[in-house]
Amino acid sequence: MSLRNFNIVFSTVFKEAVKTKAYIYITLGMLVLSVLLFASPSILNSFTKDSSEETYKLVNRTSLELSEQELSGVVGNWQIVNDGRVESLKEEIKTEELAGFFVLEDRLDLMQLNIFMPKVNNELLLTLESYIEQKRVASIVEAQSIHPTVVQALNAPLQTNFESLYETEPNALLIVYGLIAIMFLAISTYGNNVATAIASEKSSRVMEVMITKVAPVPMMYGKILGIGIASLAQLFIFIGGLLLWANLGVFNIPEGSFVQAVIETITWETAAYILIFFIIGYFIYATLFAIVGSMVSRPDDLSSATMPIVILLMASLTVEILFVMDYPEGTLTKVTSYIPFTAPMSVLIRIVYNTIAPVEIIVSLMIMILFIALFAGVAAKIYPKGVLKSDSLTIKQLFQFK
């Protein structure tokens, strides 16, 4: 009988949630957002002018012999002139005849390159500066009759190689920030939905009618699961959309882009872990929100009543940002992986960084599931009497329940 009552409440709550206009619009919006994320490189490129078609002028006021042909390795079309009025060249930039111009001058014992560009192109500047420096050194070598091999040895560049501390993509930190932000917003929003639904029915006196037909405990679990599954379905659609577009290959994703990093980091295995820990994290906090929803007399009181839960959630997020993200192998990170309130985020971060063993994941999951069962039991004791009180439930009354 209890299972039947649970199914009735679950199906009713779930259907009511997914049929609202707000739910449909948000779900479609998340699906569109997944498309825009993959299409963003192409969209940005369509608004960006091809650098190879841009024209630049170099005003050479030095004795160096510069060649337009030698500048072919630098992005854009180049014109070298020996003199030019700065003001007239500025007008050419304003009329988009030029993308920028440079004035190379002698200043006592050094050369100065004056840059006039509406938007700085660091790659172009580095290449141009390197070219001018090579020509300057070549001029000094010729004037001083220095052996070319000596110059070559002195100018040998220092090679640098970035080695990642963890077996993951360099952009993994941005991905982790995104996942943690989404988890925080999802848990706080969907958990608050549970509390609001319970408080709304309680204030409308619907609860007194329902309580005669359905036992309180199946009703509580039905609401938590009904609202939770409906809300998390939106998240599943968003992540499922990302995986679908990634595997279909319908979008042109540039190599080295952030979207490319997302595709390589969020594998099917990682996506499965993300969904599991999103669900676990939701149920940890949803039971707390359900208790609070049954304690207040009306929805207007929820903002203050749920504040301790929100503070706890924000404190968990702060710990993740300050201590876990930058140190995924630290002692504190390992500790937070076994604290139910922080474990969903901590374990997820360690999974993305590949710094957690399968055994640790299993142990953390078991602790979180046990914690959910414990709080569900406490909620089952509090909920039946809380929903029948027309006024708010005090802390003293809360601990009087046996």
Image: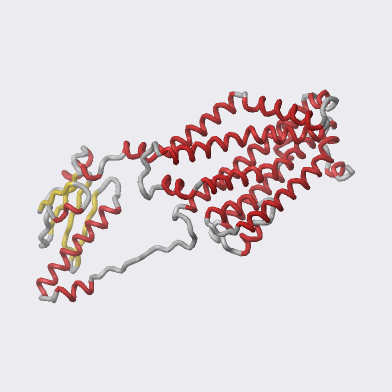
Colouring of the image: secondary structure
The residue at 70%/45% (across/down) is: 284
Viewer-side residue, 277 vs 147: 277
Viewer-side residue, 205 vs 110: 205
Query: Horizontally, is 58 left or right of 337 in the view?
Result: left
Viewer-side residue, 216 vs 325: 216
Q: Position of residue 65 (x, y in %)?
A: 10, 60
Q: Position of residue 272 (x, y in %)?
A: 57, 45
Residue 125's image quarter? bottom left
The residue at 84%/35% (across/down) is: 384
- The total number of labels drawn is 0
Q: Position of residue 309 (x, y in %)?
A: 70, 45
Viewer-side residue, 353 vs 121: 353
The residue at 48%/63% (across/down) is: 165
Residue 387's image quarter? top right
219 relative to 337, above or below: above
Q: Quadrant of the N terminus?
A: top right
398 relative to 345, above or below: above
325 relative to 239, above or below: below
Residue 11's image quarter? top right
Query: Horizontally, is 355 left or right of 280 in the view?
Result: left
Q: Position of residue 190 (x, y in %)?
A: 65, 37
Q: Quadrant of the C terminus?
A: top right
298 relative to 61, above or below: above
The residue at 66%/36% (across/down) is: 228
